[in-house]
Amino acid sequence: MFITLPRLLVVSPLALLASAVLANPITLKEQSSHITIHPESLNIDWNGLIVNSPALKVNKQQQTASDVQVNVNQTASWVLQPSGIKVTAQLKHSVLDFAFSASHLKPIKRNQPTSLEWFNLPEKQSDTLFLPFSEGMRVPIQNKTWAKFLTNSYSGSNTTQDLKMPFWTVQQGKRFVSYQLVTPTNNRLEFSNTTPRLDMSASHQFTVLSQPTSFRIRITLGDNPLDGAKQYRQWRIENGMAEPLIEKKKRNPDVAKLIGASHVYLFGTGLLSVGDVIDWWGLKKWYLTQSGLEISKDDAKALSSLQRGKDWFSQYHKQLLLDALESSLKKRFDTPFPTLADNTIERQYQAAQQRKVWLKTNAARYLISPEKWGQALSDDMLTTFRNAGLNKLWLGFDNWMPAFYQPQIVEQAKLAGYLVGTYDSYNTAIPAGVNDGWLTALLPNEMRKECAIELASGDKKKGFRNNGYYLNPNCHLEYVQKRIADIIKFGRFNSLFLDVDATAMAREDYRDNTSETHMLSSFNRRMAWISDQNIVLGSESGNSLTTQGVAFAHGLESIGFGWRDQDMHKNRESPYYLGRWYPDHKPEFFFKTAKVKAPFKSLLFDPQYRVPLYQTVFHDEVINNHHWHTDSLKFSDVQANRDLTAMLYNTPPMVHLTRDEASSVSGKRIQALKHYQSAFQPIHEQVWDQPLVDFTWLNIKGDVQKTTFSDGSTIIANFSGQPFQTDEATVKPWSILAKLSNGKFIHWQSTKQ
């Protein structure tokens, strides 16, 4: 067969010769693209842009290029020496593809991967980095604060969990170079605070388990900061990885209940709330002297010291009495530790009902009617929601016990049109007695021992906060499926929030030789199965590699930060202190407002440093939100920025509630939900199934921004203290103006300015 050379292809005769010395540059051409590659250093020039600075090393050793070949179809290949890694480069349809393959003749030891350093940011030529470590970070290369932050917080990042989508974009003048990791596993990113610019590098590790798989990347050029995200979105579609919300809604009509819905976490897991008691002194006396329940010495001492007519029954003592009573009831109606044969979910439900019946029989005269009891969700809370006009809500429990106590309330909430779910997780297993209130981690001993991830070192991977072990999601899947089915059955849920699975927390497991790629597949299979149970599934973060079955995610719009900062976590006098994990029914950590400390306040919440990369890829596929640690009301001094960013990107509000916070329509948090709903719901109902297609600054400072959706709907956010005039209307300070394709205009202003 005769092959005609493309007219623009340049083939150097010298490039066809095997070379053990410095190889000649390789030239690839296609239409208007002219690319020069130095094979031994991977220095890349594309139409005058330095796409990659000399970077290439293997195990810190510089390489030479041998067996250099350039073929007629814009493909070149060569072999790096002494590593033996084969490199293939191809220019096709304006995409530069690279594939790196480790030689099977060079064995890799289990704990000694082969490290391929392939990327080095051309920092002198570059202006801005666009990084999806969150929704999207816009990082000026010369900003020393950013350089220090990324170096301290993100050096060593992986590209499955840390990088929320496996690509980044670099701006050089008016052009944007995007790098997609087609092989997103076994990668590492490094940042360095050089003078005067930020530097960035990337490497891939060939391990015993990943060696058979080639490492592949794609490089593209564009004219817009969103081009890398748009390229990735299209690549996902072409590779069958995307499932729009409209398709998920066809499979499960309840997905429609997410459209326009605000997200609410309900706190408290006990049977009784303070509002359920009508006679505190009588209840205390009965509990201490007549109940026959087992009472701890500390509780007995604290409650016995209270004297009627002498002391005030404070809120603290009221909650102490309820917590003590709950603890005593759990001891009287206990459930065993789970086994593979019995997940104890049905027993937990039965124990919950027994506690309620026993308390009704023995203490009814001190309490309101039993069907109205409850901490997390109650009949009066549903009344408040209805009276406030909150008709679209996702309601999430901290654990499933409130639903086991009052399943009829869950049914009432579903009848009102709400999604009701519980938090669940299968990623950490702990032994009995460590923390028996951590229900999700109480997994059979066989799972904790047999499913624990074995690292390359031979050690087992410690679990969350060094408790127990992290588990491989491919292990004892039948048990997981049965427990989930039982939780849904006895809790009457129509939704579920599965912690961790959608974070793409991929690790190699040498227990059964699970690669990172296979672990991601196991997470996806697990979530897809749950979704097939007619459940509206949500999970943490919603990273792009683990979205199968997921309709919503929590965590990406406001990521965690400052984990080691003493003012945020230890110093209770600090305005930045996030709060205690106490009391159990209403932890300060979730309800106390705090200020944001520098540099986090500027870097993570200033609108000029944010860009909707995730929404460009996923707006019509996964509804994303804040992490539950930081709801919409958590940070007082950046609330307006967070509010307007959420409205601009069309992501839902999140507000935490307890029963006392939802006792009245006039309550602060109920009023906040009403205010958010007034704009988010009608906008989302119009554009929920529309891709976000454009993002622009409307002034030089970047404090007036605009998003555009595929149906032509636009949202303008004014982050400044001055009005902004458009052709059609004035956008008030700290407000948004949505112009929808259905002809509606929606003005909304943040209450925090």
Image: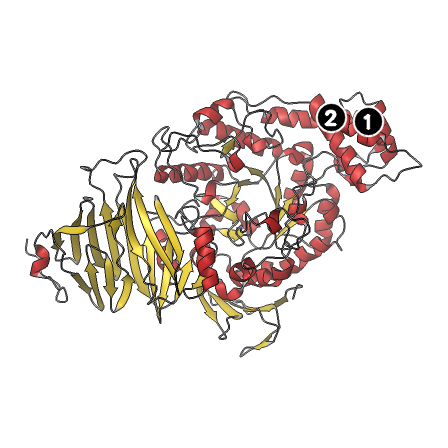
> In the rendered view, does 326 fall on the left or right side of 477?
right
> In the rendered view, does 247 fall on the left or right side of 87?
right
Name the mark on residue 328.
Answer: 2
Q: Residues within 10 Å of mark 1 (few under 14, many from 20)?
A: many
- The residue positioned 18% from the left and 64% from the top of the image is 29
Is 449 in front, or is 239?
449
Which image quarter: residue 107? top left
- SS under mark 2: helix
Q: Is residue 228 above or below residue 493?
A: below
Name the outermost residue toward the front.
Answer: 195
Q: Amino acid at mark 1?
A: Tyr
Q: Position of residue 611 (x, y in %)?
A: 47, 62
Q: Tags 2 and 1 in contact by the CB under 8 Å rule?
A: yes
> Along the polypeptide, which appears first: circle 2 or circle 1?
1
- SS under mark 1: helix
Please say whether residue 536 is visible from this viewpoint.
Answer: yes
Q: Amino acid at mark 2?
A: Ser
Q: Position of residue 544 (x, y in %)?
A: 42, 49
- The residue positioned 18% from the left and 62% from the top of the image is 28
Is 41 in front, or is 241?
41
Which image quarter: residue 350? top right
Residue where numbered disc 1 is placed: 287
